[in-house]
Image (cartoon, helix red, strand yellow):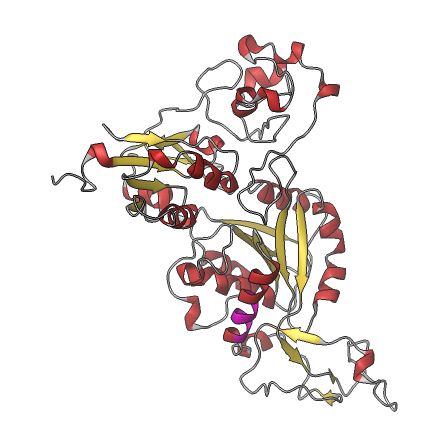
Amino acid sequence: MKNGSPTDDKQLVLLDARNLYETRIGKFHAPSVETLDPGIRQYSDLPSWIDDNSELLRGKHVLMYCTGGIRCEMASAYIRSKGAGFENVFQLYGGIQRYLEQFPDGGFFRGKNFVFDHRISVGSSDTSIMGACLICGSSYDNYSSRCRCTHCRILVLVCDSCQIKSDAYVCELCQKHRMDFGSIPSVEDGELATVLDKNDLKTVCSDSKISSQLPSRNAPRKLRILCLHGFRQNASSFKGRSASLAKKLKSIAELVFIDAPHELPFIYQSCTEAKNSCAPPSGQHAPPPENCKRKYAWSVASDFGGKVEADWKIANQPFDPLQYQGQTDGFDVSLAYLKKMFSEQGPFDGILGFSQGAAMAALLCAQGDKLKGEIDLRFVILCSGFALPLADFGQKPINCPSLHIFGSDPGKDRQITSHTSRYLASRFEDGCSVIIEHEFGHIIPTRSPYMDNIKDFLRRFL
């Protein structure tokens, strides 16, 4: 082969773009090809690692891989932005997930692929174990017990026997950088429980600073989640309805609420079934519009004029629970508006969408590479969501970590059926989506066990 071609092993380097706990249970092993494992706690640490180790990549053909390909998209762009010597960066299309589908025996991949859903990990027909217990070093690759480092909260592998002896663990990264936390004893010989005083343990987050927009290296960092309300709602009302959710997530996430760009007119039913608290009672004049809170939408009906009338108007027909199916216009306006929000108020780690807001969030995910650099999402949470029949939705499965929350069948959600929300979940690639079904109506449940499941999903991105 010609010197410098991608097939010249001396010029090749494999770069694993995943977190440390993911690489500990499975990774690629290609003969005569160097594999670089950054050993990072979380994806936001990767740019700092690339900056510190750029000479390992300069002039090489860098082959990157991750779980589903999303992280490689952003990381490869960051490497190429360094200029001369960093042009040849490639990525595994579809990530490890698609690779194992094509090579059921594992191919060059050894061990298990960590996935962000209830399965935790997915293996090939090769049952070899790559992981090892943090305490005793025995072969072990099961994260189902969710053991975490007492300091930085990263997932750690601890076998069943060692879990009985202790519930306080120090990951290998905290051991390596023990001076950041004071004197941290070794975990050799399973003696951790006898040398650590739990009263002295403190929870510390060690996010690396990758830009001026992110916290300093030692400051705890919460996930920032942009919240998109439903049809004929606004940021204020959605914030009020989500107060319990925000309170229970306050230690790990900051919820940011915004109004949609399409302002809707004030309407009321002609009979006593009117449900809008601002609707004019029978025989009385309507209150001034300035005394009522404006309502907004992410998508509107094709006959929507776009101009909001100053006065109230009567509804053309009784409430139709299927009206969302005809609200297919205005996506371009909403997309431009969200790009502006991400630019001015971002970055955001993910989006939480409710009802029509969930439909809008799903459309953003379906855009894929088209929005790269403008709207970058690590995850979405879609509550009572549905799929809008738009060409932008595409036909390919959506590759974005997603949490789908909706009422079970028979549920009490009279607006968005469980079948409709379940179909939306099916549009996301297997391994990318987690489903939570509840027995309530058109709401986001915040009681146990639903709240625990929501927290478990979000903690994977901390």
Q: Is residue 207 above or below residue 126?
A: below
Name the one closer to the observer, 332 or 403: 332
What residue is rendered at 41% in x and 63% in y? 370
Q: Which residues are magenta?
A: 333-338
Q: Residue furthest right?
A: 284
Q: Is residue 122 left or right of residue 323?
A: left
Image quadrant assignment for residue 412: bottom right
What residue is rendered at 75% in x and 49% in y? 247
Q: Is residue 395 above or below residue 90?
A: below
Q: Is residue 251 left or right of residue 51?
A: right
Q: Is residue 86 above or below residue 346?
A: above
Report whether residue 160 is seen.
Answer: yes
Report whether residue 404 is seen.
Answer: no
Name the one closer to the observer, 316 or 146: 146
Q: Main secondary structure of the magenta part?
A: helix
Position of the C terminus by quadrant: top right
- Image coordinates of residue 6 in percent, x first then y, are 21, 42
Position of the N terminus by quadrant: top left
In the rendered structure, does residue 270 fall within the stretch colored magenta? no
- Image coordinates of residue 356 in percent, x first then y, are 59, 68
- Image coordinates of residue 424 in percent, x first then y, are 50, 61
Image quadrant assignment for residue 257: bottom right
Image quadrant assignment for residue 242: bottom right
- Image coordinates of residue 437 in percent, x first then y, are 60, 52
Q: Is residue 335 left or right of residue 183?
A: left
Name the one closer to the observer, 162 or 75: 75
